[in-house]
Amino acid sequence: MRFKKMIAGLAFGVSVLAANAASAVEIEYWQYVFDSRVKAMDQLIQKFQAANPGITVKHTTFPYAEYQTKVAATVSAGQGPDVVQLFYGWVDGFIAGKLIQPLPKDAFPHDKIEAEFFPIVTAMKRNGEYYGLPTAVRSLALFYNKKAFQAAGLDPNKPPQTIEEFVAAAEKTVKRDGSGNIVSEGFAMDMAGQDHQWWREVLVRQNGGVPYTDNDRKVAYNNEAGLKALQFYVDLQNKQKVGQLGFMDEAQAAFKGGLAAMTIDGTFRLGAFNAIKSFEWGVAELPAANGVRSNYASYFANAITGKAQGEKLDAAKKFLAYVSSPEAMEIWLKAVGELPARRSAALTQENLSNPIYGPFLKGLEYAHTTLFVDEAAQRQVAIDMVNRVLIQKQDPKESLAEAAKAEQAIIDRAAK
């Protein structure tokens, strides 16, 4: 009798294990390599798996330069990620390639999304469907080196508030050698970084224009406003001589190395700048010009790929719901420095009064989000426009017109 009970017990145990194995599901999450973001996602996955013991999440990363190609190749072959990270500016390409699917409305009701997230979430909406949700959003701000300000006779606790004060501070903090060559920039210029966003969505608007019309499908900066914005930017190198394109590989590297008094960058840079030990730095809203403040807001979203079906789709829905939850956003803020995408999680008194987060949050109130059709190509247009002026010595008006024509062609091709 005891032997029979033992056998029955073993049989029951095996059946339970089999049932658990049958109910267990593994999904794969992909993002590009950015150290603080990778570590933050590892934390989120650990918490998610603890709350959902039947789901395992495999976290895979790739270098930024090859990331989109890897996603396209694997998902098209029915392999790779079930949940994928993408820049909001890539969404049209991901939809066209059938790499991602619309978010199921039962798990992600549109009215709830639009009530709880910052309005820029609608950049993930196409033809009445949402294709992804962000964990965090980013705006731009002016980072400044308090040590460099103090050495130049500036108040380290009073960063520039206007474009005139910004230029004056850059002129006072730039350092040159005996031959006039810059050895430490007043402002770190980097069109391949965030300066192309500053030019497009901030400087153009501050000079009375808009970068695009017709839902960002018609280039509108080939005019006096665009020319003033371009002239101001290139004058920082040619006239005021406070910065130089290519001074270092990246503007953020110059700032981290103490070789730039100011740089414009996003919240995603906070993790890297927190590692600076050689000087104290501060954050300020982007300088106002002509009485106008403007900013650029962006984000990486998480989406469910086309390969996620059945139980993997159910698991992917749960995982996406968690990584876009208020709890996940608080973890992300502390680990990465990017702002929560939900208004309730972001606009707390603690965050608003924070000397680092506060300026970024204020920037969100008047920020614009460019609806790119091909973010990389459109960024390159702006880079080429400035390079033609600064390197090839082309007339700014001619370079601006060439840029507008090239970018319109990119937009028109995407519409076919």
Image (cartoon, grey):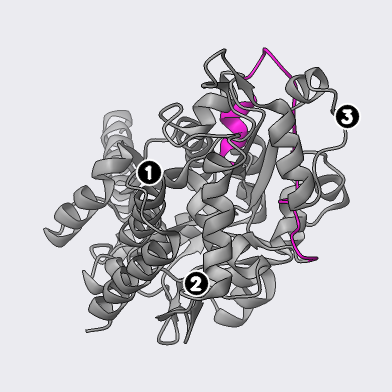
Q: Quadrant of residue 350?
A: top right
First of labels 3, 1 by sequence position = 1
- Circle 1/circle 2 CB separation < 8 Å: no
Q: Secondary structure at mark 2?
A: helix
Viewer-closest of 264 and 126: 264
Residue 47 pos. (x, y %) = 55, 40
Q: How many marks?
A: 3
Identify the residue under disc 2: 123
Residue 44 falls left or right of residue 89: right
Against 415, residue 35 (above or below) is above
Q: Which residues are magenta?
A: 268-291
Query: Alpha carbon of mark 1 to alpha carbon of mark 2: how far?
Result: 27 Å
Residue 172 pos. (x, y %) = 74, 29
Q: Amino acid at mark 3?
A: Asp
Q: Which mark is residue 29?
A: none
Look at the image and tell me in which quarter the C terminus lies: bottom left
Query: Alpha carbon of mark 3 to alpha carbon of mark 1: how far?
Result: 49 Å
Q: Which mark is residue 155?
A: 3
Residue 298 visible in the shown view:
no
Q: Quadrant of residue 201?
A: bottom right
240 in magenta: no
